[in-house]
Image (cartoon, rainbow, N blue to C red):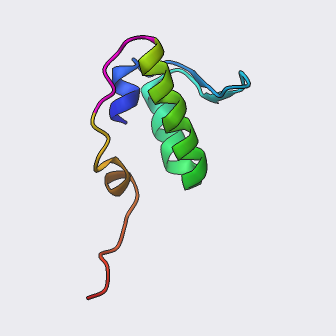
């Protein structure tokens, strides 16, 4: 969600122009929680490209996945 915040939670489209996420913080949150990992990663890549196109610093996204998705600890 850090990248959504940096982008002002604007609409996000894929390379073909199809809308991935509508405008607003709630829309971004629903998208992240409801989509499969591959789709979420694809949207993240599009959001990074948008940051770069707008000359906005891409935020540190480390820890975002484990915060949004319950990842169980590895067995010891």
The location of residue 24, given as percent across then percent down, is 47, 23
Q: How many labels sit on residues? A: 0
Q: Is residue 73 above or below residue 22?
A: below
Q: Is residue 75 left or right of residue 27?
A: left
Q: Residue furthest top?
A: 54
Q: Is residue 10 left or right of residue 65?
A: right
Report the magenta stretch's main SS: loop
Magenta span of residues: 54-59
The location of residue 44, given as percent across then percent down, is 49, 37
Q: Is residue 3 left or right of residue 37?
A: left
Q: Is residue 48 left or right of residue 74?
A: right
The location of residue 71, given as percent across then percent down, is 37, 67
| Residue 25 placement: quadrant | top left
Residue closer to the observer: 6 or 57 = 57
- Name the quarter where the N terminus is drawn: top left
Q: Residue furthest bottom?
A: 76
The location of residue 48, given as percent across then percent down, is 45, 28
Q: Residue at x 51, y 35 (%)?
A: 45
């Amino acid at each position: 969600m850090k990248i959504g915040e940096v982008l002002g939670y604007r609409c996000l489209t894929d390379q073909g122009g199809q809308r991935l996420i509508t405008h607003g913080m709630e829309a971004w949150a629903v998208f992240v929680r409801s989509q499969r990992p591959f789709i979420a990663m694809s949207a993240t890549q599009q959001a990074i490209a948008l940051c770069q196109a707008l000359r906005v610093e891409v935020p540190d996204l480390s820890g975002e996945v484990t915060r949004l998705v319950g990842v169980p600890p590895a067995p010891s």
